Amino acid sequence: MARTLITGGLVVTASDELHVDVLVDESQVVALATPGSHGWTADRVIDARGKYVIPGGVDGHTHMEMPFGGTLSADTFETGTRAAAWGGTTTIVDFAIQPKGGSLREGLDAWHEKADGTCAIDYGFHMIMSDVNESSLKQMDRLIEAGVTSFKLFTAYPGVFYSDDGQILRAMQRAGDNGGLIMMHAENGIAIDVLVEQALARGERDPRYHGEVRKALLEAEATHRVIRLSQVAGSPVYVVHVSAREALAELTRARDEGLPVFGETCPQYLFLSTDNLAEPDFEGAKYVCSTPLRPKEHQAALWRGLRTDDLQVVSTDHCPFCFKGQKDMGIGDFSKIPNGMPGVENRMDLLHQAVVDGHLSRRRWIEIACAAPARMFGLYPRKGTIAPGSDADIVVYDPEAEQTISAATHHMNVDYSAYEGRRITGRVETVLSRGVPVIEGGAYVGRAGHGAYVPRGLCQYL
């Protein structure tokens, strides 16, 4: 492997903005220095004048090849990680799923088999616990030893992933002992199922009703409940894909009380709304995800939560289903539309647009997209920053380039873009993964199998 010198750029991390050169040796960053103050030589020199030099993005919430509603999410680990690289993300943390009646290890092994030898970038795993019992609680300790240190439970999807309050409490108690982080999908699924049944009985079958039955108050109620359960258990909790200002208010209140409570939102909640769900001719199905898109007025609260650190992370919840052949399973019945949207390729660019629009500072962009997810999931400082000893996961980013997001040009394995036609400023130019070029000169130069499994430590916010 070669020594690489990245010269002339503005290095932006969560803590600093510095005009320094970056020296990479083998797979790691080895030094930073003021241009002209060193005599470094390298096999490869990347001219980053006029560009940002930023850490590769860490997307802490993806679903590649995930079974849902009788189908599979459309991106494989190969196509999904390649698309992530195109968008400046160099690490994903995907969700392995415990099979009902099976063990956590069985689920983890199945996901390793899917990912091994296929990924363009590095990856780790969370574990979805779909069957909380004495056996699976004991297995949590062994998974932590294998570098799987976070466990997701659901107050939604009865009969599929749903856990009752007692099961959630037991898992949180175990995490309180072993240092694991409990991640919660917080919606009141029992109540939502009643509202779905009632809506369908009234003949309300279009995609927009998906958002109407999954009410913001039911997200807030479940958020409040899992926070208080975590308080009883004496463990932290991380609430995924926060979409509603009422749910955010619950997180803010808990954090003001000093509780170890954390929250994530996603680009779709920051840039899209129920107006998209209401698009005619079944087009709204493209935007069906859970938690659902909310009315536009929720967006201001989410941006504020990101600025005040009441929301710490922006992940994608990337779970793509094609409009034709998958989403259309729900024509005539919104409850049969597979829940999920594409986005792993768009996250870094959309958040840079938020910098351009004045919602975020440059350092906050890197904090919520790179450093905070790396800390949250036990990857920092190997991932999420540019510093001596860190992995050389580095993106050279052109902050002035303009582009139009479109399914015609994206690299995700899905037949539509949730942001079709949106013009944004900023584009990835070069991507290194552990010092190896993956994107270079507007071309993919990586390979399936370069990406390595990364065992994770415990949450570093605790």
Image (tube, rainbow, N blue to C red):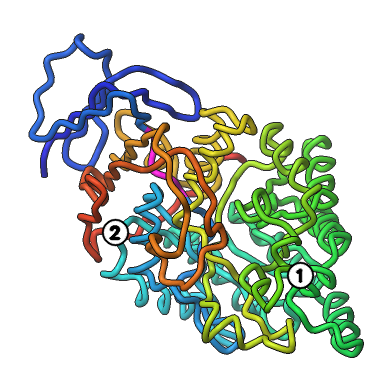
**Figure quadrant of the C terminus:** top right
**Figure quadrant of the N terminus:** top left
Q: Give the image quarter of residue 209.
A: bottom right
| Magenta-drawn stretch, dominant element (helix, strand or loop) | strand
Q: Nearer the viewer, residue 124 or 137?
A: 124
Residue at the image point whose x is 85% and y is 65% from the top: 215
Of pointers 1 and 2, the one earlier in the residue sequence: 1
Going by the numbered disc 1, the residue's amino acid type is: Thr
Q: Is residue 24 visible?
A: yes
Give the residues drawn in magenta, as a range. 54-58
User: Is 81 part of what is drawn in magenta?
Assistant: no
Residue at the image point whose x is 41% and y is 37% from the top: 381
Element under disc 1: loop
- In the rendered image, residue 337, in percent from the top left (x then y), is placed at 66, 81
Q: Give the image quarter of residue 182.
A: bottom right
Image height of 20 relative to 308, above or below: above
Going by the numbered disc 2, the residue's amino acid type is: Gly
Circle 1/circle 2 CB separation < 8 Å? no
Element under disc 2: loop
Q: Nearer the viewer, residue 98 or 357?
A: 357
Label 2: few (<14), some (14–19) or many (≥20) C-alpha neighbours in 10 Å: many
- In the rendered image, residue 441, in percent from the top left (x then y), is placed at 22, 45
Q: Is residue 176 visible?
A: no
The answer to whether residue 326 is left or right of residue 402 is: right
Q: Which mark, residue 451?
A: 2
User: Is 57 part of what is drawn in magenta?
Assistant: yes
Q: Which residue is mark 1?
A: 155
Q: Which mark, residue 275?
A: none
